Every structure is written in structure tokens, then in C-alpha cells.
Amino acid sequence: MSSVHVIDLPRRVIVGNNVLETIGDHILDLGLGKRVLVVSGSSSTRIYAGRVLDVLRDKGFEAWHLSVGSASISEAEKTVATAKEVKAEVVVGVGGGKAIDVAKYTAYKIGARLVSIPTAPSHDGIASPFASIKGLDKPTSIKTIMPSIVLADIEVISKAPRRLIISGCGDLIGKFTSVLDWRLAHRLRGEYYGEYAASLALLSAKHVVKYSEWFSSKTIPLEAVRALVEALISSGIAMGIAGSTRPASGSEHLFAHALDITANYPALHGEEVGVGTIMMMYLHGKNWKKIRSVLKKIGAPTTAKELGVKPDDVIKALTIAHKIRPRYTILGEKGLTVEAAERLAKITGVIP
Ligand SMILES: [Zn+2]
């Protein structure tokens, strides 16, 4: 283990109402560059990207726009080619997950600066250096670069569909088990463990529990959305501090990635992570019922049926989860047998 520890953090984080139009000033302030490629999703996020482009052009930037339909390697490579062609110095991702993932990959590949403008609070990648690109040889995220600027406009984000907001809560709930797994790997394997990064990740999960009443209400109040966004950013920063996804991704994430393989991306990432957390809390001998009741309360899936998968998909995913990546967790080196997986899913009520 190296004694040198490098921490990459965003240079500026802006969270507030109606801050989207200030993005040009922040890029100018930090001197990130004048040639900007804006990457958005293909649906409603295009409108926000349009507003960003208007602001940038008003401020004298040269700006280009590209929308992506998915975060696949082919779309990502196409974006890289465009970014090279226009000699982009800054890549701005405007969107939920896909656009930001592609922007991260692109900025990393061409050595540009990265700006993250999330339009939905569905996962903790909005302020982390890790990107999920589909079609690479592994289903987990790859390390790219930390955004120089994270700009979260609560006014914009609060208009995201409720399901995306609740998915973000699920991703954060997962920190209860990812931190337990990290400690376990530290104790059993002598793996590097950072108390501060672990505490920060855990804090973000506790935040969701604290505000669960608000998330369960029909119209989620702006304060709750803001708390969620701040917690997602904290979790991303915890990864930046740790230099890996360790504080934010353990066995519950291995399960989620495995389910994406066995059932072909059946649900939102945070929804899968939430269900994974229930089961992994049980394996850790912790209060899994509490996790399940919080997820139920906020309207997040807690069963295979609610995830839209068959019981067999869950069992299969549990048995292959340990192979997803070389990361020591409560699943151990050999993983779960079919019998153990079935028992676990039944006891926790994930399958009937
Ligand atoms: Zn996640």
C-alpha cells in the first residue's frame, strides 16, 4: 500500500435555485477554457442544454451541442471524436446519468475540463470521477476525472420525475452496507480504509433516513430535494477523497450490477441498490428491516416483483455478484450458493 494519497475534488460546487444561467461566469472565473462542448440527453434535458448554450454564447464562448441516447461506448467514442474535432477545452454534461457519464469519459479522453450539471438526483455520479459506460468489458464504473464544477439547480432538479428522485435515495441508502463492506475488507485484507471518507458516505445515507418523511409525501418539498442533492454530492466527494468507489459501492452495488446482467438493466440503478442493501444488511447481521421500512415508506422497490424481475433473476444475480469485480465484501471470495441465495432473498421478503 502506498503512503501517498492523492485527493481530487471539484473546484467549485454551486447548489441553489435558478443558478443554471450563472454557469458561464463560473467557467470564466476558473479559467477553464473558451471552447465548450455541451453533452445532453435526448429528451427534456435538451431544453436545459439549450439554456446553457445560450448563456455560454452570450458570454463569448464558442459552444457546440451533442445529445446522446445512451451511455454506450459507441456513443461515448462518437462524442470524443466530436470533442477532438472542435478542440473542446471544456466538456459540460447536462442530464440525469447518461449525459454526465459520456461527458466524463470524453473530458478524460481528450484531457479537457469537466463540468457537471445534473438535471435529476438519481445517483451519486453527479460529483464523482467515476463513469458508467455500457459495452466496456465490465459492468462497473471506470475512473475518469473529477468535475471542476458541479452546478446543481434545485429548481431544475426538483422537476425530475419522482421515480428518479427516489432512485437517488436508494443509491444513498446503499452506503450503509458499502461502508460495512469496506471496513470488513480493511479488517480481513488490510485494505486501505479511510475513516473520513467512510463517515462522509455514511452521513449521506443517514440524511435520506432523516428526511424519509418528506420523501414519502406526494409532492416532495424543495428542501428535501436540496438535502438529497447535497448528500449525493457528498457521496461523490467521499469517493474523490478515498480515490476509489469503495465508500459508496459494496456488495449492494455488486448485486445491482449483477442484476443488470441477469435481467438486462430491469430497473433504475438506485432502485436495484436499495433492494441489494436490504439483503446485504441481513448478511452483515444488521437491521435490514429498518432499511426495508425506509425504502417502503419513500415508495422505493423492496421486492423482485417491484423491480420487474423474476425470483430466479435475483437468485442468479446473488450467486454471481462476487465475480463482478475483484472487491472483497460480505459475499466473500466464493460468493453465495443457489440455496443460500434463495434463502437470503426469501427471508428478506425480496422473493416470495
Ligand atoms: Zn451507485
Image (tube, rainbow, N blue to C red):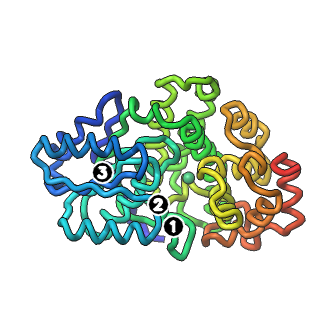
Q: Can residue 181 be seen in this view?
A: no
Q: In this view, does 113 lie to the left or right of 226?
A: left
Distance (Cα) linking label 2 and label 1: 8 Å
User: Residue 41: where, in percent of width, then height?
Assistant: 40, 52
Distance (Cα) linking label 1 and label 3: 21 Å
Dot 1: element:
loop
Q: Is the C-beta separation of discs 1 and 3 under 8 Å?
A: no
Dot 3: element:
strand
Type of amino acid under label 1? Lys
User: Which residue is drawn at the image coordinates 25% and 57% (left, top)?
Assistant: 37
Q: Which mark is residue 134?
A: 1
Type of amino acid under label 2? Ser
Mark 2 Cα shell of 10 Å, populated few (<14), some (14-19), many (≥20)? some
Q: Is the C-beta separation of discs 2 and 1 under 8 Å?
A: yes
The quarter of the picture where residue 104 lies is bottom left
**Circle nearer the viewer, 2 or 1:** 2
Q: Which of marks 2 and 1 is nearer the N terminus?
A: 2
Which residue, given by chain and number where applicable, does mark 2 sit on? 70
The quarter of the picture where residue 186 lies is bottom right
User: Which residue is drawn at the image coordinates 61% and 67% (left, top)?
Assistant: 327
Q: In this view, does 300 lie to the left or right of 35?
A: right
User: Residue 273: where, in percent of width, then height?
Assistant: 64, 51
User: Which residue is drawn at the image coordinates 64% and 47% (left, top)?
Assistant: 271
Q: Is residue 28 visible?
A: yes
Q: Which mark is residue 115?
A: 3
- Tell me: is circle 3 under 8 Å from ligand 1: no
Residue 261 sits above or below residue 119 on the image:
below
